[in-house]
Image (spheres, rainbow, N blue to C red):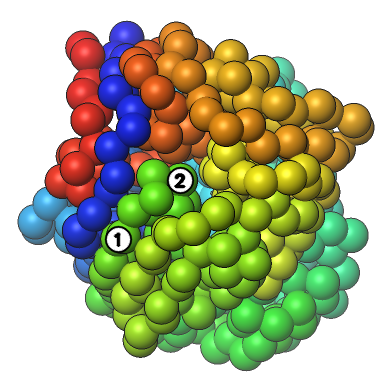
């Protein structure tokens, strides 16, 4: 198993370019299952999760090919498969995104329940309830969701929780349903807007994506399309914090600053200088880092996917702050590892009280999930001495070439195979 070794204390300086968004690429690749004709997806990040969904699409009978390292062609016109097996779904929960498209286009889907997850229970009950409202017959057997429908029918769906992949699954299914669907309390994340843009290019009739009420007028078929994935806002935020935590000066190119307004506001409050341009950001850290409270929320609130990284930064701030996690019930797995690096953090329920320390000191630590891994890399960049991070495969699920990008900014970081 690969490990990452960081010799901390280097000030990051230079330019970094942001890759396509993992959490937009996954639903858009799943949406190709709805189309008749070739779909070309550009700005696709090279990540393990992307390879997993492409493998799933090809196991389901689709033709997939790489046009260039960041562009894939997918054609599902002749494909007939309908099963997403446990071996794949357990490695990536987002495999459940094939459920809505398979049901809508092929009339049936058999998708494994994903099983345990490091950050919370993460049930799929709202995906299933919404699909049932669209007319699907669903039963669970031997750890699988079996769903069937001859043709889905438009419905008025109220989501009890504004779930991101739940909204995406229902949007995709509703596109081929008969009549109008309304999804209320829908997730508003930029990845939903990007999926809606791709579906619209396929011929879908969608209004309101990016608000909490999405209207979809079903159509009888959808066609091939070409779409460029939006930049990854979590990768962008992670590099903003990499600059901040090392006292650096980094220009972050090919990003959408407007997708990070809450993160930017919190960094400015902490004393970091952030300059926004149309598609780039300049982050400059000088002077004292101040402790600031954060509370995660759905978009446009502070993203749960940035909580661990922001906590790493706050371990070195002046004063104490409260970091509250409201989206997932168990997303503090990085805390005990940050403490191994010398951080002062106490957890009470869903809140972590972080009191800044003057320095972190390198130590061996273990990554437990994707964003927790990123927080350990960030802490390692700032820590004195060597930090060895094991179970780094989590990082490869969501960050493209992170050690090369950090090394190009001056970090002393290497992967040990
Ligand atoms: N929930 C339910 N029932 C459902 C669906 C969700 O109770 O049927 C709960 C979840 O357990 C959670 C809350 O609703 O407590 C919100 O979860 P959501 O469904 O929005 O999360 P998700 O769709 O499974 C996506 C991202 C996550 C990101 C969350 C929150 C993708 C592929 N994944 O997950 O990304 O943290 O939204 O923004 O889009 C990551 O990239 O590291 C990652 C975990």
Question: Residue 96 appears in which quarter of the rendering?
Answer: top right
Question: Residue 165 appears in which quarter of the rendering?
Answer: bottom right
Residue at the image position 90 percent from the left and 30 percent from the top: 348
Q: Nearer the viewer, residue 123 or 392?
A: 392
Residue at the image position 22 percent from the left and 30 percent from the top: 412
**In this rendering, is residue 404 above or below 27?**
above
* Left or right of 395 on screen, residue 136: right
Q: Helix, strand, or loop for circle 2?
A: helix
* Left or right of 103 on screen, residue 45: left
Question: Residue 207, position in %: x, y?
Answer: 62, 90
Question: Residue 410, position in %: x, y?
Answer: 19, 43
Q: Nearer the viewer, residue 306 or 230?
A: 306
Q: Are marks 1 and 2 in contact (CB under 8 Å)?
A: no
Residue at the image position 29 percent from the left and 18 percent from the top: 5
What is the crowding at mark 2: few (fewer than 14 residues within 10 Å), some, or many (at least 20)? many
Disc 1 under 8 Å from ligand 1? The reply is no
Q: Which residue is mark 1?
A: 250
Question: Residue 299, position in %: x, y?
Answer: 68, 68
Q: Helix, strand, or loop for circle 1?
A: strand
* Left or right of 395 on screen, residue 44: left
Along the polypeptide, which appears first: circle 1 or circle 2?
2
**In this rendering, is residue 309 above or below 174?**
above
- The quadrant of the rendering that contains the N terminus is top left
- Residue 226 seen from this side: yes
Residue at the image position 89 percent from the left and 60 percent from the top: 160
Q: Which residue is mark 2?
A: 245
- Residue 199 seen from this side: no
Q: Nearer the viewer, residue 412 or 218?
A: 412
Extreme residue toward the left, this view: 68
* Left or right of 207 on screen, residue 184: right
Compute the Cα span from label 1 to label 2: 11 Å
- The quadrant of the rendering that contains the C terminus is top left
């Amino acid at each position: 198993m690969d490990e990452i070794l960081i010799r901390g204390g280097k000030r990051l300086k230079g330019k970094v370019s942001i890759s396509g968004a993992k959490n937009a690429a996954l639903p858009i690749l799943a949406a190709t299952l709805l189309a008749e004709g070739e779909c070309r997806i550009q700005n696709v990040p090279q990540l393990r999760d992307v390879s997993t969904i492409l493998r799933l699409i090809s196991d389901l009978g689709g033709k997939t090919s790489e046009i260039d390292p960041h562009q894939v062609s997918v054609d599902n016109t002749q494909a007939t498969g309908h099963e997403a097996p446990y071996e794949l779904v357990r490695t990536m929960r987002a495999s459940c995104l094939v459920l809505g498209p398979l049901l809508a286009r092929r009339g049936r889907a058999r998708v494994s329940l994903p099983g345990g997850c490091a950050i919370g229970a993460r049930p799929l009950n709202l995906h299933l309830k919404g699909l049932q409202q669209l007319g699907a017959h669903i039963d669970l057997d031997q750890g699988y969701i079996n769903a069937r429908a001859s043709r889905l029918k438009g419905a008025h769906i109220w989501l009890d929780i504004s779930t991101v992949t739940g909204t995406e699954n229902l949007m995709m299914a509703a596109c081929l349903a008969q009549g109008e669907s309304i999804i209320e309390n829908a997730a508003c994340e930029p990845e939903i807007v990007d999926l809606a843009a791709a579906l619209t290019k396929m011929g879908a009739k969608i209004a309101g994506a990016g608000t909490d009420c999405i209207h979809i007028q079903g159509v009888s078929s959808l066609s091939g399309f070409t779409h460029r994935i939006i930049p990854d806002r979590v990768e962008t935020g992670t590099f903003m914090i990499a600059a901040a935590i090392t006292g650096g000066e980094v220009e972050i190119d090919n990003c959408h600053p407007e997708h990070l307004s809450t993160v930017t506001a919190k960094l400015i409050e902490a004393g970091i200088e952030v300059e926004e341009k149309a598609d780039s950001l300049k982050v400059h850290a000088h002077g004292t880092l101040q402790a600031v409270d954060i509370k995660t929320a759905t978009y446009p609130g502070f993203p749960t996917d940035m909580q661990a990284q922001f906590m790493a930064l706050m371990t070195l701030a002046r004063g104490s702050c409260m970091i509250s996690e409201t989206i997932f019930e168990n997303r503090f797995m990085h805390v005990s590892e940050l403490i191994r690096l010398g951080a002062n953090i106490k957890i009470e329920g869903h809140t972590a009280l972080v009191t800044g320390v003057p320095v972190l000191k390198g130590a061996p630590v273990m990554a437990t999930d994707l964003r927790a891994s990123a927080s350990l890399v960030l802490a390692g960049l700032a820590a004195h001495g060597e930090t060895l991070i094991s179970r780094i495969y989590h990082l490869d699920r969501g960050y493209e070439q992170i050690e090369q990008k950090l090394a190009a900014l001056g970090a002393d970081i290497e992967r040990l195979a």
